[in-house]
Amino acid sequence: MGFLFDLPLIITGPAIIAILVGVSLMSLSWFRKHRLPRLKFGEGDVEFSAAMLASIMVFYGLATALTAVQVWEAYEKTREITEVEASTLAAFYRDVSEYPEPSRSLMREQIRDYTHGVIHESWPQQRRGVIPTEGVRSMNQLQSVLFHFEPTTEAQKGLALEALASYDRMMEARRMRINSVERKLPGILWLVIILGAFISLISAFYFPVHDERVHRAQAL
């Protein structure tokens, strides 16, 4: 199922909706043909079923709304983490740009390689729910050069301290970004969404609607 994450949302979204609608319509047609004629409805049963369906849909709507809020909050939190990592990475790049040669060129090249790996390797992996590990080697090499630099002037000492602080903030943001891969909806919420959708759909079948087209519109 990982290939679904590589497809554009404009394709996967309508495709999933079309599949769900198709399954619902086929299930309704089968139910009307094989089950609905065998049911006996008394006076007032339809009104009671309609009230029950409305109640079920209200609770299901609340559950899906709360789930959507949680997903949106997780998205906003991840976006904030990504922006913090990008800003700290830019600040770190500017700090090392003031280092003397050859440390300056070496660290700038390693930062560019790391940024390229994050954009073109780590992010696609995170999109598929895979925790990226490729950036560890680049960070270890960069850290080795950074920690072995010996400042000779007071200005270089201040610069080294600021660069180390920027590096620590960048690593903290990186760790938070990687941890966000494991941020997902709890299993109980998935159960509520799937089971609620199933109950809501089945409940819509129990109506003696003569015109099947009207029944389909009500079920959807």
Image (cartoon, helix red, strand yellow):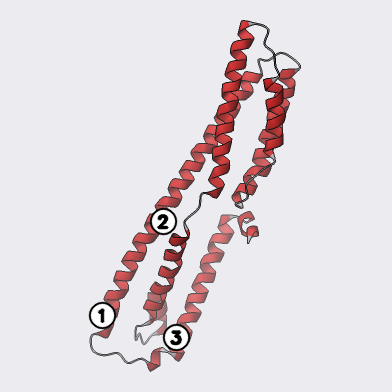
Q: Provide the secondary structure element on which disc 2 rests.
A: helix
Q: Is residue 96 above or below residue 5?
A: above
Residue 139 appears in which quarter of the rendering? top right
Specify the label residue 31 is tagged with: 3
Q: Position of residue 66 (x, y in %)?
A: 37, 55
Dot 3 amino acid type: Phe
Q: How many marks?
A: 3
Q: What residue is drawn where x is 51% and y is 42%?
A: 78
Q: Quadrant of the C terminus?
A: bottom left
Q: Find the distance from the CA under tag 1 to the CA under tag 3.
A: 20 Å
Q: What residue is drawn where x is 61% and y is 14%?
A: 159
Left or right: residue 189 compared with residue 140? left
Specify the label residue 48 is tagged with: 1
Disc 1 vs disc 3: Cβ atoms closer than 8 Å?
Answer: no
Q: For label 1, count other residues whose C-alpha is less than 10 Å away and answer few (under 14), some (14-19) or many (20+).
A: few
- Reading the image, the residue beneath label 2 is 67
